[in-house]
Image (tube, rainbow, N blue to C red):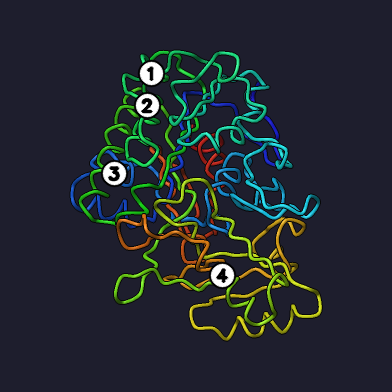
Amino acid sequence: MSTIEVNGRRYASPKRPTVVICVDGCEPDYIAQAVAAGHMPTTRRFLAEGTALIGDCVVPSFTNPNNLSIVTGVPPSVHGICGNYLFDVASGSEVMMNDPKWLRAPSILAGLADAGASVAVVTAKDKLRRLLGHGVKGICFSSEKADQVTVAENGIDDVLPLVGMPVPDVYSAELSEFIFAAGVRLLETRRPDLMYLSTTDYVQHKHAPGEPEANRFYAMLDRYLRQLDELGAVIALTADHGMNAKTRLDASPNVIFLQDLLDGWLGRERARVILPITDPYVVHHGALGSFATVYLPANVIADVAARLRELLGIELVLTRDDAAARFELPADRIGDLVVVSERSVVLGTGRARHDLSQLELPLRSHGGISEQRVPIVINRPIANIDPNRRWRNFDVFDLALNHAQ
């Protein structure tokens, strides 16, 4: 095997162990602040001696669409995953997009595994594990369910003794640390040709760049980057999306409740608002993000779009076709309108449907254009790289495999 083709792009087989990392919610300023404060000496060296870029994630800037874009090398218009959650028109129901049946394209991970490379995938939550592991012949498990792994299902067993950590709480920084610890131990013991490590954004939802808790998280990440680097790996780090505060002056959540608005304008049950950020883990974001899709009767679409555009806090309102073209989304899986809020604003459905009582700190979230910038950091220099082109987070496998070996 020398190269493979996946979704119209060619990838060289790894000549040395290669680790691609998606740091969930990694606004570039997290790295800048932690590096400036001296908490990331290894990353500082990567930035000076390797390759450092700022790229764009896909919009909606949520976990599922971006992780799947990264591992397929293409946008959601090709792979089909346009959110964590969608309205399934065929069944008339709202569902999570966790099932591989929603995938429309194979992954680079599966392609390399089919071609004979040894592949390992470790992610934080099991909701993403099934999508990332689809078609992958190799190791694939989540830190959330690390105590339930089997060779038949996950390609490995006895993960806890291997890693030397207990199963972390799903709402903790340790859920991500477990992933890095597992990556180091897998590289030491199994030495896979390719690893994909994908974290959770629990810390980023709670703490801004430069805060002590955020700096502790990135110092931890830096220690594992040093170990992976010392083990001889090519390391390519990016993020699925950024993160911003979504608050009013009094630090309360700055929310536009779209379903309540539309019910008031049109009457109940004439509009359906879908929030693609929705997942089972709502403690840190309350299912509030900066991107929504709206299903409407055909005869009111233009009027509703015009009225939404006039609202303070709304950045963009697009029709289905315009949104699909601009954001490279599957048109059959989004509503009649796509609504994007401004940097400090999130979108909700109805006020009564969001339990914000568990938010311990001022709301931080993502989903919009304002969270599109992400870091791309590689521990090897790449010659003649163009810093002015539009890099995407889903270029990271191309950079790692075709240019950084």
Mark-to-mark CA distance, 3 and 1: 23 Å
Residue kind at label 3, given as amino acid type? Tyr
Give the numbered dot on residue 340.
4
Point out the tag, 4 or 3, that comes first from the N-terminus.
3
Front: mark 2 or 4: 2
Point out the tag, 2 or 3, that comes first from the N-terminus.
2
Q: Are marks 2 and 1 in contact (CB under 8 Å)?
A: yes
Mark-to-mark CA distance, 2 and 4: 37 Å
Q: Split into 4 quadrants, where in the image is the N terminus?
A: top right
Mark 3 lies on residue: 218
Q: Position of residue 130 (x, y in %)?
A: 60, 32
Disc 1 crowd, CA 10 A, few/some/many (<14, 14-19, 20+): some
Point out the tag, 3 or 1, that comes first from the N-terminus.
1
At x 54%, y 26%, the residue is 14
Indicate whether 181 appears above or below 267. above
Point out the tag, 2 or 1, that comes first from the N-terminus.
1
At x 56%, y 66%, the residue is 349
Mark-to-mark CA distance, 2 and 1: 7 Å
At x 75%, y 67%, the residue is 321
Give the side of residue 171 with respect to residue 88, left or right: left
Residue kind at label 1, given as amino acid type? Leu
Residue kind at label 4, given as amino acid type? Val
Tag 1's secondary structure? helix
In the image shown, does 56 or 64 lie closer to the viewer? Answer: 64
Mark-to-mark CA distance, 2 and 3: 21 Å
Mark 1 lies on residue: 160
Mark-to-mark CA distance, 1 and 4: 42 Å
